[in-house]
Amino acid sequence: MRIGVFIPELVRHLFKKPATVDYPFIKQELPPGFRGSPYLKPETCIVCRACERDCPAEAIEIISINEAEKRFKMIIHNDRCIHCAQCVDSCPTDAMNMDTKFEISDYDRHNLKMEWEYVRAVIKPKSAEPKS
Amino acid sequence: MKFQIPIGPQHPALKEPIGLRVMVEGEIIRDADLRLGYNHRGIEKLAEQKTWIQNIYLTERICGICSHSHTTCYVQGVEKLMELQVPRRGLYIRTLVSELERVHSHLLWLGVAGHEAGFDSFFMYTWRDREIVMDILETITGNRVHYGINTIGGVRRDLDELQVKKILDSLDILRKRSEYYKNLGTTEPSFVARLAGVGYLSKEDAIALCAVGPTLRASGVPRDVRKDDPYAVYDEIPFEVCTADTCDVLGRTVVRIKELFQSYNMIEFMLKNLPEGPIAVRAPRRAKPNEVVSRYEAPRGENIHYIKSNGTDKPERLKVRAPTLGNYAATIKMLKNGFIADVPLIFAAIDPCICCAERAVALVDARTGEEKVVPMLALKQLSQKIYGLNARKREVEWPL
């Protein structure tokens, strides 16, 4: 029976850099596909409501402001959003996108709401192909 | 002289709420009783109100550690209902993520075992190495915990050359570190002495009590869904079912360390034999009326989802049997005739995930033992009545 075999490993780690990062001062690079918060590019939205229908958290709301002018308003309730990016996958015209922000906490949930008011775009949706 | 000691639902030794009543004689446990339901969230009922696609993200949130296990189990079932043929590249990526998840879950468990055994430097080392896997998962899926890579009919993201190279490089570091943990048992006698002989579960008991996963395999039963009923691409990947015959916590540690190496080999095999082609097929929005049972070998054991469809875009019923639920009966057996100081270690050895297993609540009167069904409103009124008698003072000023 040997005692203290773990000690060399411990001593070796005394001279190593810490494994943790000095986070608020040093920010780590995020991977390119990181799923942050969803945002809308209003100029390409055709108001097909696919994102609203597929959102698991019911965080997306599209309301009609003026039927004649075809003006719509999209509200993303980021307090409800679970950052799954299903809206990005469901969107046929690439109008929904994800940013890479993750420091989005707030004292009031209503501050997290994001709104866009826009006229419906007239773009033909891409043929029905699964998005990769 | 016998005493009944309640452990939980809130207790420093437990990470999640579960009620455990142990009957002790001196410091030897003679009997134990589990009380569940403190973490019930009504997920199965919620699933009936969401569409097939929305339910992927709901099932993902059943558990944080084995989030991919639950989605894969669900998605496999739905694909069977919709009669979809998933492309092979999609299946490979799905399996790759599930093996990476197994690595991260087992490393996490090793750390927890070290912590419960009083070996905290081991806990910190394994959790540091677990970060490597978490980083890989974040790069290929976009999130550290809820990967969201599954979709009905395949996966959502493809792998590129750069990512494949990065995973292969990280695997070398992980292999080297795991080799060290593997040899640690032979060189560090105190750790082994703490684990050996604790929580004995004989082979016959393990089979009779329907234990699953590493708990069952540590009792010498080579049962693994990946081998017995291969799903996805497990019939093409070479691997061995790891077992141990010591039937105690040491055996469960050995099984998990062995499985780590199997997972590294499988990940390497999958990355080197990744087929070309599409990663997903388009799924219909509705499924024909039918029912299906889907099985999946999660890091903790066999996970079962039962899904029933009724022709609409929503499931009529989703039933989840998480691996932890299968291990509870065996845990009671393991606790009996053990020491009270071993409770956290034995309990941690099944890798319990309480919130996975909480699928039902029964209200039992503590005095009469009578079971009853109570509407939510009545439950709320009852709690207001109880806590009203013992009201907390609000807005009290600091007296100094």
Image (spheres, rainbow, N blue to C red):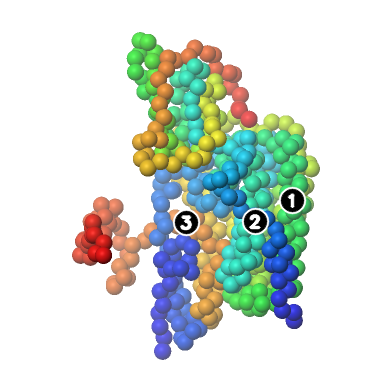
Give the residue at x 56% y 53%: B65
Q: Secondary structure at mark 3?
A: helix
The amino acid at mark 3 is Cys
Nearer the observer: mark 2 or 1; the answer is 2
Q: Position of residue B56 (x, y in %)?
A: 52, 41
Q: Label 1, secondary structure: give it.
A: helix
Looking at the rendered structure, which numbered label has been put on residue B60?
A: none
- Which residue corresponds to mark 2? A18
Q: Nearer the viewer, mark 3 or mark 2?
A: 2
Between the residue at mark 2 and the residue at mark 1, the CA separation in whole angstroms equals 21 Å
Residue B398: image x %, image y %? 26, 61
Which of the 4 image quarters holds residue A89? top right
Residue to which mark 1 is pinned: B171
Query: At label 2, which amino acid type do we have?
Result: Pro
Q: How many marks?
A: 3
Distance CA(mark 3)–CA(mark 2):
33 Å
What mark, if any, has residue B355 been given in the picture?
3
Residue B4 versus residue A32: which sits nearer the camera?
Answer: A32
